[in-house]
Amino acid sequence: MSTPIYWLGNIEENRIWIKREDLLPFSFGGNKARKAELFMREIKNGGYDCVVTYGTSSSNHCRVISNLCVSHGLPCYVISPSEKSDPTYNSVMTALFKAQTTTVPAQEVHDTIENKMRELEKSGYRPYFIEGGGHGKLGTEAYVQCYEEIKEYEIEKGIRFDYIFLASGTGTTQAGLVCGQLADGAKRQVIGISIARRNPRGREVVLDCVRSYFAALGQRISEKRLQEAVVFIDDYINGGYGLDSVKIRETIEWVLKTYGIPLDATYTGKSFYGMTEYIRQRCVRDRNILFLHTGGTPLFFDALKNAERYRREGVI
Ligand SMILES: *Cc1c(COP(=O)(O)O)cnc(C)c1O
């Protein structure tokens, strides 16, 4: 699977391209679909017969994994933290795909997962566990492969991206791109725009993920290069996971009107807004910039519906 890169336009005298991970062909695409392909390969090779995973009701991950499971006839168990939120298109689809969701207070999630795994094993199943958001080695590997696609595009077109911007959540997607970059030594900066986590923890998680990827390959990367390569910006969180703002809603509307591309309020709208602010505030000029559209298209429709409600209620 590979996704197209398109020329977008100029922002503050920079040249912007977009890589459309949202156009991956399975279950509305997105980075969870790219990661899921590798999980499925391991599930098949390992002879697993059901899947246990974790995520919130708005999770793209749970939608993609439960879709994959139902299409392969595998039972799927989702552990969700209880939260005050309305159903989203993702949660409606996760239910449609017959995932069996157990909702527990956030602090009980860990034990509930362990119990579910043990219970399934006792009943003679061979459950496969996927971390929330597809975090971990396979998720990282998926984005090392994505980085290779970016390099191929550069060679074909004779250009080099000075920056790659993306939404960073668990940090796995960012870690994969950084691993690709460290392996090839290209002079560029991958910039993760945090959608929820704060520093220093947010950045530490990306660093750990990069370290363990190279450790598993038996390679050592100097601490100096590692520190330089991981940029995790927590300036545009807007209060936390899933919380948007007028600025983010305006960005989503502008990108849709100008380029006909859907962004959502939790991930891509936040990171696109973060990218434009980063460029403006740090006076980035005359550079080639790639924005990684990490997907989340069902959340675009949630954002659209919410924006309409805000307008009706006079919030905007
Ligand atoms: C999960 C997700 C992210 C964050 O990916 P991580 O690998 O967890 O950092 C970004 N964008 C979208 C649309 C997502 O669904």
Image (cartoon, grey):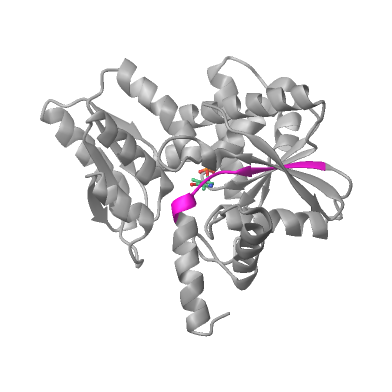
Placement of 293 over or under 35, stated as above or below: below
Residue 111 visible to an observer of this rendering:
no
Placement of 116 over or under 124, stated as above or below: below
- Residue at position x 46%, y 60% from top? 301
Check residue 89 for magenta coloring: no
211 or 299: which is nearer to us?
A: 299
Snapshot quadrant of residue 157: top right
User: Position of 299 compared to 69: left or right?
Assistant: right
153 or 180: which is nearer to us?
A: 153
Q: Where is residue 18 in the image (x, y as percent from the top left)?
A: 67, 42
User: Position of 170 compared to 174: left or right?
Assistant: left
Check residue 296 for magenta coloring: yes
- Residue at position x 58%, y 79% from top? 316
Q: Tell me which segment is drawn in magenta.
A: 288-298
253 or 238: which is nearer to us?
A: 253
Q: Position of residue 24 (x, y in %)?
A: 50, 35
Placement of 8 over or under 255, stated as above or below: above
- Residue at position x 49%, y 49% from top? 296
108 or 237: which is nearer to us?
A: 237
Q: Position of residue 61 (x, y in %)?
A: 41, 43
- Residue at position x 62%, y 34% from top? 4
Snapshot quadrant of residue 174: top right
Residue pushed farthest left? 123
How many discs appear?
A: 0
Placement of 202 over or under 247, stated as above or below: above
